């Protein structure tokens, strides 16, 4: 395990928060894209 | 064939579909690589382990500004040349920019606690970022509120234009208002203060990673927007008929 | 009743529903105050609790006109009034939905905005507690104001004028809790008053609001 | 036994009586169409019957929770899908399946479409489906075919007939021909309220006139 | 042009026109702050100038949606757009009318509210000067926001969200003038900046606002 | 010489072409009535001619400042009196006396009444008086007789004829009979825009369909 010294909490929180934000953004992006693709396919099949 | 023809939705879908896998792969490799490498760098003699935050903070801050500039460019292309995909790209970019701004603010705030002894200070740099976040929020809210896509594209384009001027104006106003604590751009300042190579190279990689991440997300989100517009267009035509 | 709550929440979170606008407005307000007052911690700290309460109140205020107006315009309100729900219940549910979509996010965001304004750390739990107890009353009183002004075009400013005076007792006790909490004093008395006001408002105002709605539907 | 009985009713709008002395009753299976020139008070009468405003004089006999009211505004939310809109009103009016209503109004293939993306006629059909899920016997309809083309008007007629056939009743105001030959017609023109000192004024405008 | 200005002023001062609501809101806001912050002079004096500026800004904000919305609803805006006036001129006149009916009363009332908040006497002239120079920009930017949101139902909160960030430079320099004036410092620089911003806004924003209006009339 | 000439015009609404290939011209003294089913694009065409929205294709030839546009909304302020309302529009359109317009529309005795206290028909007459004070030659009218009774419709016809007689022209959209036998009629039903890839899409809905 690498040594973070007395600032361990600071560094881990930074990485944690940033990665969480990025993950949320990526998840939302992918989910919305999949949803749009599904709905469009259904429309093109029916209509 | 002019470059503008790629603003045609069909061509855009084809081209972006081809580029997307590479963008995703590059973004994954560079972002993860840069962040892991950055995380493993040794401690700084002054800042201790907190230097590791720079690999998140600086790329995010950089992208936060650059994405707004890109949105401005895309808005201008829409307003002048009426390329529909370009308006959708501006829309797609905004949430990415907002998240980048949030990351810069969050990492900065967490960093400020040990360095300056405070989570938040009304320093000009930090304040400007807060203002930038406000502009992102307003821009996204306007896109969400206007139902007609043509009006929404035009109105957000005008807002982006006026907003850019005022974001710049606010930056100078804030500088006048308060002198700050935040360090300058250490990548380019005098050689003595130059960041050592140990930190510089992972920083470069991480910056590249954030840029590629933006590109990949932008492509996906723009594709989502294109599909949504197409769905709405098909429904509108059916309803009209 | 549950169906109404679910629908209102769904509408608020869909595109164009305005979810989050209240928090964004709150954020802007918290950012504006230092521009006006000056960036020094010494200037901001003593007023932080007051600004946060006033800000929460204004953010709540500006979203009030959505409570009934949209339903009035598209005819839903007429239909709800002829539905088997008592109109008082409808009012209460709508106020609850307003609180969930506006009050709760404000409370969740308040600690962050507290940081921006250098609210003393000791005051933070008191801020949250006072908002949690006080904001339901804000939503309910707001629903009353919205019910009174529902038929008016562009009644926004009038709505503010009607509702703000009703908010004063809540504001006084809410801010007092935070101030006393920050100084480590006893907060029991203002807390009791605040809770009392909220309880009274929640129990009685739905009837007044439903009466006002009936007049406006007529 | 009648679903609705109105005796010597007077209704007011804007503080002035609109019509007065109106009496009629509706048994299950019957439909009544109100006619009259602009501004005579058809809308006002319907709203009074629906319980949205009090009568100025006279009596309305009506079982509790018997009325389903529909005016021009259908109470649809553009952001919600057809199913969500309908399910909401079904839940408010005591539950029940929305499938049959969707099918009856030929909306099944549009079930997931947001209401904002419907055409005017499709919206109207959704509004009628809403009437079906309320399961209430007495429909009170204000100009139900406004802005509908001929085909939609025919579909509306079918829905009304089915409702009457199941023992329901309908009270409608309209200016145009609904194609409902079996419906009785009441022309309100003869009931226009006369000015004059009233025992109980309908509002400020009457009290001070 | 003059006819439009005269009509807008007449409409604002007739019953239901909302004249004076802005000042009333300003008054309530200034009355709320001591409840939130605490009534001590020592607490109020340092923040008075900032609160007055923020209050003026919010009062201005809440009356913005009237600039175009009523004319849009009754069709006047369509007719004005086909009239021989350039739309930019219409926008400018309407912003001017908004300033006369909202900005001027606020300025006139500001000294009174300054007393309520214990604004130092020396700062008073600076407060008036800064408001006089700064508020025209607020009205003009507000007209831009109103033009963008004119087609939206219940766009009030969105309008605030769009307009408030644009107000930041004006607020910063305006409040800085009062702050420096109160301390007897030099106010020339912020005054110059404030005047520059107002001049720039008045010269350029009408074009952006007219463009937004054209989109919304389409 | 014609007041208005329209060549191969296409207009769009909601990002989709509504009608296309429309051509006509109007000389002084002529009136043209647009007809067509709901939603065909009459209102859109009129707004395009009035300059409120740009055409998607085709050309509109028109002298500058020649059009007076009137839709359902009359642009009246309820708080202002009839005179004030009319004087305002007269001033905006370059001055002139409002007396003749008031007289022509039989509004003189109502001159001091606030517009809010007018009945629907009186409001419409005020809207027509507004057209007179603009002194513009080309009237573009969208369903001008909506909610008017027979007497008011006749008065409207008189006003139009007087305008044509003075060398004006009128372009109108309507569903009902205006009683203007001399007017030409253009049915838009034949010009409905066809789907298909367009060279220059009218908006998002066409660019992405
Ligand atoms: C909370 C909000 C903060 C924001 C919005 C913020 C914003 C920024 C921005 C925009 C940059 C890029 C500057 C450039 O490259 O020109 C930057 C760089 C930097 N920030 Fe922050 N910052 C914040 C807090 C902090 C804190 C608390 C620290 C540490 C004590 C810090 C340390 C740095 C460092 C070391 C750089 C790198 C400078 C460079 O190499 O360019 N920041 N920050
Ligand atoms: N908001 C109002 N305030 C005052 N009076 C009103 C209002 N709305 C309608 N009225 C008046 O009340 C009377 C009755 O109106 P009502 O809407 O019931 O007529 P209606 O028969 O439904 O007419 P229509 O055929 O035009 O729908 C009319 O004379 C009208 O002018
Ligand atoms: N706000 C809007 N957004 C999208 N599409 C619209 C909008 N308003 C109208 N449309 C569509 O544009 C088309 C043309 O509408 P328009 O109002 O010009 O028709 P119209 O011929 O005037 O009809 P009507 O006889 O009902 O007045 C219609 O198909 C309509 O559905
Ligand atoms: Mg009616
Ligand atoms: Mg039309």
Image (spheres, coloured by chain):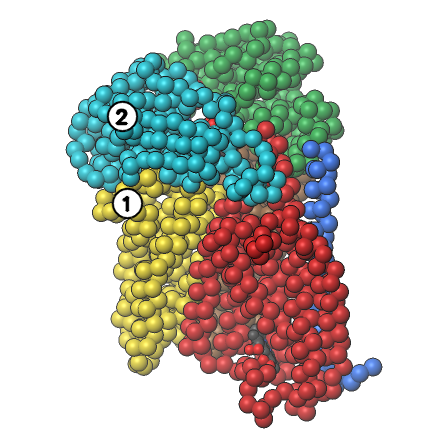
Chain colours: A blue, B red, C brown, D green, E yellow, F cyan
Q: Which mark is residue E59?
A: none
Look at the image and tell me in which quarter the N terminus of chain F lies.
top left
Look at the image and tell me in which quarter the C terminus of chain F lies.
top right
* Residue at the limit of the structure toward the front, as seen here: B1
* Residue at the limit of the structure toward the right, as seen here: A1
Q: Residues within 10 Å of mark 2 (few under 14, many from 20)?
A: some
> Viewed as shown, does residue B221 lie left or right of C164?
right
**Callout 2 and callout 1 share a chain:** no
Residue at the location (25% across, 41% down)? Answer: F92
Give above or below for F95 relative to F123.
Answer: below
Say what secondary structure mark 2 lies in.
loop
Say what secondary structure mark 1 lies in.
loop
Q: Distance from label 2 to label 1 (Cα)?
A: 25 Å
| C-beta proximity under 8 Å, tags 2 and 1 | no
> Viewed as shown, does residue B28 lie left or right of F89?
right
Q: Residues within 10 Å of mark 1 (few under 14, many from 20)?
A: some
The chain identifier of the residue carrying mark 1 reads E
Residue D124, quarter of picture: top right
Residue E191, quarter of picture: bottom left
Residue at the location (65% across, 63% down)? Answer: B215
Location of mark 1 (residue)? E85
Q: How many marks?
A: 2
Give above or below for E35 relative to C73.
Answer: below
Residue at the location (67% across, 79% down)? Answer: B203
**Pick the front one: B101 or E28:** B101
**Pick the front one: C99 or D131:** D131
**Pick the front one: B92 or C121:** B92
Q: Give the foreground label among 2 and 1.
A: 2
Location of mark 2 (residue)? F28
**Pick the front one: E42 or A38:** A38
Residue F113: in sight, yes or no? no
Residue at the location (51% across, 17% down)? Answer: D173
């Amino acid at each position: 395990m690498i040594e973070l010294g007395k600032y361990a909490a600071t560094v881990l929180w930074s990485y944690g928060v940033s990665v969480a934000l990025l993950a949320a953004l990526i998840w939302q992006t992918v989910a919305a894209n999949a949803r749009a693709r599904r709905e469009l396919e259904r429309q093109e099949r029916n209509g | 064939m002019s470059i503008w023809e790629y603003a045609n939705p069909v061509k855009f879908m084809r081209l972006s579909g081809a580029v997307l896998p590479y963008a995703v792969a590059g973004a994954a490799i560079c972002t993860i690589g840069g962040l892991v490498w950055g995380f493993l760098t040794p401690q700084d003699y002054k800042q201790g382990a907190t230097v590791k935050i720079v690999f998140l903070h600086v790329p995010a801050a950089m992208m936060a500004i650059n994405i707004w500039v890109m949105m401005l460019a895309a808005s201008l292309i829409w307003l002048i040349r009426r390329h529909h995909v370009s308006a959708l790209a501006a829309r797609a970019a905004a949430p990415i920019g907002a998240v980048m701004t949030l990351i810069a603010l969050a990492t900065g705030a967490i960093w400020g606690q040990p360095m300056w002894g405070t989570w938040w200070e009304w320093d000009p740099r930090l304040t400007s970022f807060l203002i930038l976040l406000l502009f992102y929020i307003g821009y996204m809210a306007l896109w969400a509120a206007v139902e007609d896509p043509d009006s929404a594209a035009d109105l957000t384009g005008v807002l982006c234009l006026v907003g850019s001027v005022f974001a710049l104006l606010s930056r100078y106003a804030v500088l006048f208002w308060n002198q700050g604590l935040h360090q300058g751009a250490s990548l380019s300042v005098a050689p003595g203060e130059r960041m050592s190579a140990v930190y510089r190279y992972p920083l470069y990689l991480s910056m590249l990673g954030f840029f590629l991440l933006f590109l990949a997300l932008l492509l996906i989100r723009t594709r989502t927007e294109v599909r949504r517009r197409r769905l709405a267009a098909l429904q509108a035509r059916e309803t009209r008929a | 009743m549950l169906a109404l709550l679910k629908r209102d929440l769904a509408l608020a979170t869909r595109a164009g529903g305005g979810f989050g606008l209240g928090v964004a407005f709150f954020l802007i307000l918290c950012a504006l105050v230092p521009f006006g007052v000056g960036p020094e911690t010494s200037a901001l700290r003593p007023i932080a609790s007051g600004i946060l309460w006033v800000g929460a109140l204004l953010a709540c205020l500006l979203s009030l006109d959505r409570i009934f107006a949209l339903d009035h315009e598209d005819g839903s309100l007429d239909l709800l009034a002829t539905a088997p729900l008592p109109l008082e219940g409808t009012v209460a549910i709508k106020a609850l939905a307003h609180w969930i979509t506006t009050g709760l996010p404000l409370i969740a965001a308040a600690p962050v905005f507290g940081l921006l304004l250098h609210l003393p750390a000791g005051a933070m739990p008191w801020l949250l507690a006072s908002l949690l107890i006080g904001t339901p009353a804000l939503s309910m009183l707001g629903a009353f104001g919205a019910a009174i002004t529902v038929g008016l075009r562009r009644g926004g400013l009038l709505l503010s004028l009607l509702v703000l005076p009703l908010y004063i007792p809540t504001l006084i006790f809410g801010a007092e809790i935070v101030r006393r909490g920050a100084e480590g004093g006893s907060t029991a008395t203002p807390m009791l008053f605040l809770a009392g006001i909220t309880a009274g408002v929640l129990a009685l105002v739905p009837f007044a609001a439903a009466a006002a709605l009936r007049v406006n539907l007529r | 036994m009648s679903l609705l009985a109105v005796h010597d009713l007077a209704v007011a709008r804007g503080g002035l009586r609109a019509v007065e002395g109106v009496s009629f009753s509706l048994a299950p299976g019957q439909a009544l169409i109100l006619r009259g020139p602009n501004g005579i008070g058809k809308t006002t009468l319907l709203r009074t019957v629906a319980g949205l405003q009090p009568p100025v004089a006279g009596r309305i006999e009506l079982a509790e929770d018997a009325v389903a009211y529909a005016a021009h505004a259908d109470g649809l939310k553009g952001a919600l899908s057809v199913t969500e809109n309908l399910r909401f009103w079904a839940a408010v009016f005591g539950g029940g399946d929305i499938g049959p209503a969707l099918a009856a109004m030929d909306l099944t293939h549009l079930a997931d479409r947001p209401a904002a993306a419907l055409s005017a006629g499709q919206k109207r059909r959704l509004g009628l489906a809403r009437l079906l899920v309320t399961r209430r016997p007495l429909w009170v309809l204000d100009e139900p075919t406004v802005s509908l083309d001929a085909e939609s008007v025919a579909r509306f007629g079918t829905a009304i007939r089915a409702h009457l056939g199941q023992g329901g009743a309908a009270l409608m105001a309209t200016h145009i021909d609904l194609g409902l030959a079996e419906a009785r017609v009441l022309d309100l023109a003869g009931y226009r309220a006369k000015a004059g000192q009233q025992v109980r004024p309908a509002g400020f405008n009457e009290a001070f006139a």
